[in-house]
Image (cartoon, helix red, strand yellow):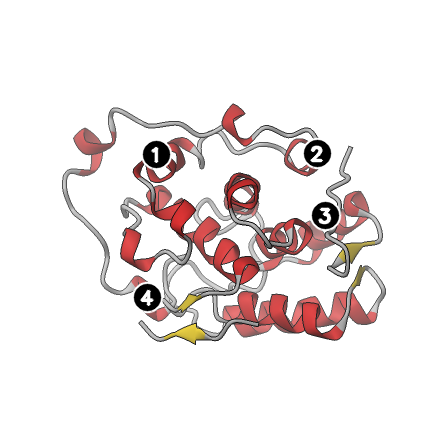
Amino acid sequence: MGRERQGGMAVGAMAGGISVRSWPALVERVLAEANRPRSEDHGDRHWRAVAAAGRMLCERVPGSDREAVMLFALLHDTRRENEYSDPGHGPRAAAYLRRLVADGAVRGAADDIDRLAHAIARHADGLLDDDPTVGVCWDADRLNLWRVGIRPEPARLCTGAARGRELILWAQGLHETAPTWEEVLAPGFDPRSVGGEDPEWDLRWGDQGNDDDWPRGMRP
């Protein structure tokens, strides 16, 4: 695993990667067990938007594990207890992943589970990572900062694919057009069918740049 630098549901796993016993059953379970699945900023719609961004990035980042990225999208904010300062929500979500592994709902080699647990546990800490899967996970989440009025900063994204202007602007409309789980997990899902540049963004939000608090784990 790359170390961080401070600063028809049928998605197929890569060979040797992570697998899910039943995606429909897992989605149903997670939605039932999540703390705040109806949250506008950190609930199910956000998770689906992250999944769509993850699908787009996996097409462009060689070596990323698409199944792991989909699990990250589904699980990363499930243990949030509030909408603002909750620095423990990532580690709690990583512990939840390990519970799903123990139950047999998620399977994978120890290194792959550890990599995904790391991505989930540290996703809101403002770090960078050169591992393709971890980088895609964090970038998919950060591209969705538009939903809270924050423009994603290229310097705070891990992958070259996510730093491009085209993808950052595509993510503007992602929260409003988030696909269903059935759609985003389908093998033939085209991420270009959702998202899109929002020409009204500057009028609504102004040139406010970024919230300096988010790297410490509050926003994504």
Q: Which x, y percent locates residue 209?
A: 18, 49
**Which amino acid type is shown beneath numbered disc 3?**
Val
Q: Which x, y percent locates residue 173?
A: 39, 31
Q: Which mark is residue 57?
A: none
Q: Is residue 66 above or below residue 200?
A: below
Query: In this figure, which residue is indicated by the disc labeled 1?
Result: 166
* Mark nearer the N terminus (1 vs 3): 3
Q: Is residue 212 above or below residue 193?
A: below
Residue at disc 4, secondary structure: helix
Q: Do tag 2 and tag 4 residues touch (Cβ < 8 Å)?
A: no
Query: Outermost residue, left direction?
Result: 207
**Which amino acid type is shown beneath numbered disc 2?**
Glu
Q: Depth-wise, is mark 1 or mark 3 nearer the camera?
A: 1
Q: Residues within 10 Å of mark 4 (few under 14, many from 20)?
A: some
* Mark nearer the N terminus (2 vs 3): 3
Q: Do tag 1 and tag 3 residues touch (Cβ < 8 Å)?
A: no
Q: Is residue 53 above or below residue 203?
A: below
Residue at disc 2, secondary structure: helix
Query: In this figure, which residue is indicated by the disc labeled 3?
Result: 27
Q: Depth-wise, is mark 1 or mark 2 nearer the camera?
A: 1
* Mark nearer the N terminus (2 vs 4): 2
Q: Which x, y percent locates residue 170?
A: 38, 32
Q: Residues within 10 Å of mark 3 (few under 14, many from 20)?
A: some
Query: Outermost residue, front direction?
Result: 62
Q: Depth-wise, is mark 2 or mark 3 nearer the camera?
A: 2
Q: Which mark is residue 182?
A: 2
Identity of the residue drawn at 61% across and 58% down: 75
Q: Mark 1 to mark 3: distance in Å?
A: 30 Å
Q: Mark 2 to mark 3: distance in Å?
A: 10 Å
Q: Residues within 10 Å of mark 2 (few under 14, many from 20)?
A: some
